[in-house]
Structure formats: structure tokens, C-alpha cells
Amino acid sequence: MRFGIRCLLLPLLASLLLGAAEPKLVPDVSQRNVEIRYSFTGAELLLFGAILYPGGRVPEHGADVAVVVKGPLEPIVVREKKKVAGIWMNVESARFRSAPAFYAVASSRPLRELVDERMAAIYELGLGNIQLSPSTGAPPDVQRRFETGFIDLMQRRQLYLENPKGVEISEGVLYRARLNIPARVPVGDYTAETFLIRDGRVVAGAVREIRIEKLGFERWMANAAEHWSFAYGLAAVLLSLLLGWGASAIANRR
């Protein structure tokens, strides 16, 4: 009986000791709340922190760090235009259930040098590994074409970013990364994920929450458009007519 209990306890103790031997991350971000006002032209997020190694001993070869900021997730429909009889028309489309409205990744080295394809897919490291969750029954090659087109579109809008040398590590312990938040970034809840990578695998991870929201007049306008869409649209039309009439009156006086 005692021998059986020892056989059960030894693997458990070994796993606990091995887990304790893994390093830990102590991350933080420069802004937990990003406020969008009328003068907002973008922001720069500083992600920084420390790597705590067991016993305070930094390994000879050290480790690498990758940071990912993404959110909010939303369903989208991607449409493909083709020229039919000389007219550009929406011919095919694909629906995705959970596409991040913003995605930025930075790493201390190119991701392909840090992890293999399987590990990158598990942790969604890199633009080619974002899990968009397609909801259509299209063949894999068609889905992949739409995914590639969508990611390319978001890159051109500066909403999907990848920086293979965006993380600096000092003395093997302190790290920092700077990620740009564009002016057109959507409001909502975001996550800032930090991954410690060594020998091709993720050995530690940590998450911080970020909130991006509109304040002041911009927030009032956004709420009006969302909750009172008819009144908002009617007011926009009336304002356009008033401005057009005013411009015409000024031009006629001249």
C-alpha cells in the first residue's frame, strides 16, 4: 500500500518541481485606458515587464519574448469583387465568426525563428495564424483566399501589424515593446498578451486588459448613432441640406 502511494506521489512531486523551475512573467502596459477625443491621432502603447527566473539565475542563452495586442472580436463578412460585363460586382463572399478588429504582434526575433507552425497556431502568433473561425462551408483553398485578402486589407488600413524586432530585452531580464494604435482603431475591450519563448515552446504567458473608449462629444455621437439611429440619420440629412443651402446662398451673393 505504501509503495503504491509513493508511486502515485513521485510523479506529482516531480511535476510540481518542474513547474516551479519554469520562469514567470511580470508584465504591465503604459495605458490601461485609451481615450479617444476629437484631437485623437493615435497612441503608442508601451508593454514592459520583467522575467523572473528560478533562483534569480538567468540562463546562458536566455529566452525570447513576443507580445500580442488584439480585440475586440466581431463577426464579419468579406466580399470579393469581380468584373462582370464591364461592371465591378460582389460575386463571392465568406463569413467569419470572430475576427479581431485590431491585431498587433511584436517579438524579439522573427517568429519563424522562435516557434514552429504548430506552436504559432496554438497561441495565434503572427498574422498568418489569427483564428478567424470561418462559418461557411467553402473549400479550404477558398477560405484561405478570403482570409489572406481580409488580412491584407486590414494591413493596408494599419489595423493589423507585425514587427519581428519590436521587443527589446535588457540583461536577459527586462523587456519592453512599443505598439502603435492608429486613429481609426475601434472602441472596445482589448487584451495585451505576453509570451516567454525558449527552445521553440512557450514556457510562460501573462495577460493584461486594455479598454479603448470614446469620451466627450465623440462618445455622445457614437451613442446617438447606436441607440437613436433614425434620429441620428435624420439629423445628419438635415444638417447636410442646411450646409448645402448656406454654401449656395453665399455663392449667389458673390
Image (spheres, rainbow, N blue to C red):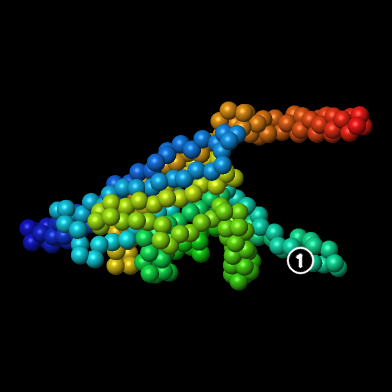
Q: Amino acid at mark 1?
A: Lys
Provide residue 34's location: percent of width, then percent of height.
48, 38
Quarter of the figure with the N terminus: bottom left
Q: In screen coordinates, is 148 left or right of 242?
A: left
Q: Is residue 222 above or below residue 78?
A: above
User: Where on the picture, by quarter, is residue 82?
Assistant: bottom right
For the C terminus, the image quarter is top right
Give the answer, above or below, for where 51 lies relative to 139.
above
From the top left corner, tell me how far across and down residue 185 is, in percent. 56, 45
Q: Residue at x 20, y 62 (%)?
A: 59
Residue name at image x 51 percent, y 39 percent: 212
Residue toward you, 196 or 99: 196
Q: Which residue in the protein does label 1 denote?
A: 82
Q: Quadrant of residue 165?
A: bottom left
| Residue 215: image location, x then y, percent | 56, 30
Question: Relative to 49, is 83 on the left or the right?
Answer: right
Q: Outermost residue toward the bottom?
A: 141
Q: Residue drawn at (82%, 67%), measured in percent from left and top?
A: 84
Query: Is residue 92 in view from this perspective?
Result: yes
Dividing the picture into quadrants, the one containing residue 22 is: bottom left
Q: Position of residue 247 (x, y in %)?
A: 85, 33
Characterize the local packing of mark 1: few (<14), some (14-19) or many (20 or more) Cα atoms within 10 angstroms: few
In this orientation, does residue 97 appear?
no
Q: Nearer the viewer, residue 125 or 245?
A: 245
Specify the farthest residue to the front.
254
View extreme (left): residue: 2
Observer-nearest of 84 and 139: 84
